[in-house]
Amino acid sequence: MSLVPWVYKNIYVDQKYSQSRDYLINNYLLKIKQKLDNEITLHQNTGNLVWDGAYILSKYLYRLKLKNKKCIELGCGTGLVGLSAWTYGADVTLTDIEDVIPLVEENVNTNVEKVLKEIDNNNNNQSINGVKLFKENIRIKTLNWGASNCKDLDTFDIVFGSEILYYAKSHKALIETLQHICNENTLCVFIYKTRNLGEENFFELAKNEGFNIEYIDNKKLIAEFQESEYHIIYLKKS
């Protein structure tokens, strides 16, 4: 019996290298600017592009109860996941390294202003989806992973991570960060793609450091990625 190849059906594939990409999330149209001036690879300028994992995770968020949840996104890149969580009523902190922050700020400021204006024009300060949204409930912070860099951070209800597991050398620092910002009630929601670059090392390290891992059924992903090599996992402290 021959294998049936996965057919790439992402409706946004033609926009991959566009200056701006549009995403319909929670009935809001988010416009995400990309920075394409420099070469983008898995090891440089990764935060300048919307990777498929961010899109898949953003479309998954409706399954989580995010209203009034205190959330943080690690390695937020262009900001799509954090912005998407905000539209569901989450209080969100988007974090990344210093070089990425200007692009995050531009995307957050542009979209928050756009969404709030849309709500004001249509529903007299009521959210389109019945959840009030506030500008002060989304913020941006420079963060380099590691125990010494997150001492001023509190714990969070939910931690998001989109395609941040491919670089094995960062796993120890990532775990140190999670140890600081997670308590026994914190849910970490990560998406990764199997690239055979050592992702499995992170899972082993996380287990050794006291985290339980739950692998989410790919049938819960958006249809065009259910047969792909993308996977969502939950992590919680045991």
Image (cartoon, grey):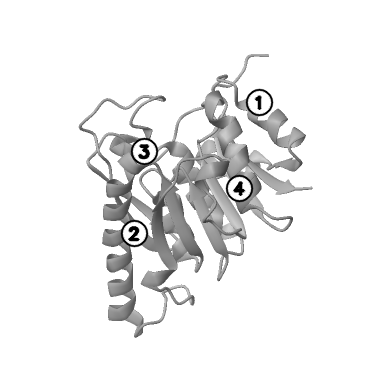
Helix, strand or loop at mark 3: helix
The numbered mark at residue 210 is none
Q: Secondary structure at mark 4?
A: strand
Disc with the residue nearer the chain's start (3 vs 1) = 3
Write the residue at 48% across / 75% down: 131
> Which amino acid type is shown beneath numbered disc 4?
Val
How far apart are the two marked residues, 2 and 4, measured between alpha carbons?
23 Å
Quadrant placement of the N terminus: top right
**Quick one: 71 or 5, which is closer to the camera?**
71
In percent of width and height, residue 176 lies at 61, 40
Q: CA distance from mark 1 to mark 2?
A: 35 Å
Comes first in the chain, label 2 or label 4:
2
Disc 1 from disc 4: Cα separation: 16 Å
**Residue matched to label 1:** 200
Residue contact between numbered discs 4 and 3, judged by CB atoms under 8 Å: no
Quarter of the image for residue 204 reads: top right
> Which residue carries the number 3 mark?
47
Position of 116 relative to 172 (above/below): below
As drawn, the residue found furthest toward the top would be 1
Q: CA distance from mark 3 to mark 1?
A: 23 Å
Q: Which marked residue is nearer to the observer: mark 1 or mark 2?
A: 1
- In the picture, the disc for residue 29 is 2
Of callouts 1 and 4, the N-terminal one: 4
Q: Residues within 10 Å of mark 1 (few under 14, many from 20)?
A: some
Residue bearing mark 4? 189
Residue 46: % across, % down: 37, 33
